[in-house]
Image (tube, rainbow, N blue to C red):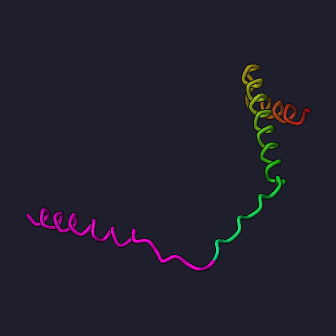
């Protein structure tokens, strides 16, 4: 019975308490801040392209190593040479 009483109180108070948070704030007399100018492409953007290319290269090298059934030191050596190749 106590749980039902707590639930009834909770469900009664919840909509009232929620109404206070949704009240609109008073408008300010200050003008809105101007929008920031878009910045040109940064080096970080180009490095993500480099990272994608590096990942694609590594994935291709790993597929080749798997096709050749290389394991252990032979696989590591193959990957190093494959990744360093242009």
Q: Decide which of 16, 2 is in the foreground and name it.
A: 16
The stretch in magenta equals: 1-30
Given residues 40 and 7, the one toward you in this image is 40
Residue 79, image x and y in percent? 81, 33
The image quarter in which residue 55 lies:
top right
Where 70 sits versus 73, above or below? above
The answer to whether 81 appears left or right of 27 in the picture is right
Q: Residue at x 64, y 71 (%)?
A: 32
Q: Where is residue 47 in the image (x, y as percent from the top left)?
A: 81, 48
Of all residues shown, which one is farthest toward the front?
A: 29
Q: Position of residue 33 (x, y in %)?
A: 67, 71
Q: Residue 3 in magenta?
A: yes
Q: Is residue 48 above or below residue 76?
A: below
**Is residue 45 on the magenta stretch?**
no
Q: What residue do we see at 64% from left, 75% from top?
A: 31
State whether the magenta stretch is mostly helix, strand or loop. Answer: helix
> From what the image shows, is residue 69 above or below residue 41?
above
Left or right of 11? Residue 57 is right
- Residue at image point 73% right, 25% down: 63
> What quarter of the picture does the C terminus occupy?
top right
Instruction: Classify residue 17 by image quadrant.
Output: bottom left
Looking at the image, which residue sits at the far right? 86
Quarter of the picture holding the N terminus: bottom left
Q: Position of residue 48 (x, y in %)?
A: 77, 46
* Residue 69 in which image quadrant: top right
Residue at the image position 39 percent from the left and 68 percent from the top:
22
């Amino acid at each position: 019975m106590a749980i039902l009483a707590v639930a009834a109180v909770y469900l009664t108070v919840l909509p009232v308490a929620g109404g206070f948070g949704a009240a609109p704030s008073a408008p300010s007399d200050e003008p809105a801040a101007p929008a920031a100018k878009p910045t040109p492409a940064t080096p970080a953007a180009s490095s993500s392209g480099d990272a994608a290319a590096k990942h694609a290269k590594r994935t291709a090298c790993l597929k080749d190593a798997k096709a050749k059934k290389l394991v252990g030191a032979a696989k590591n050596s193959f990957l190093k040479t494959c990744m360093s190749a242009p």
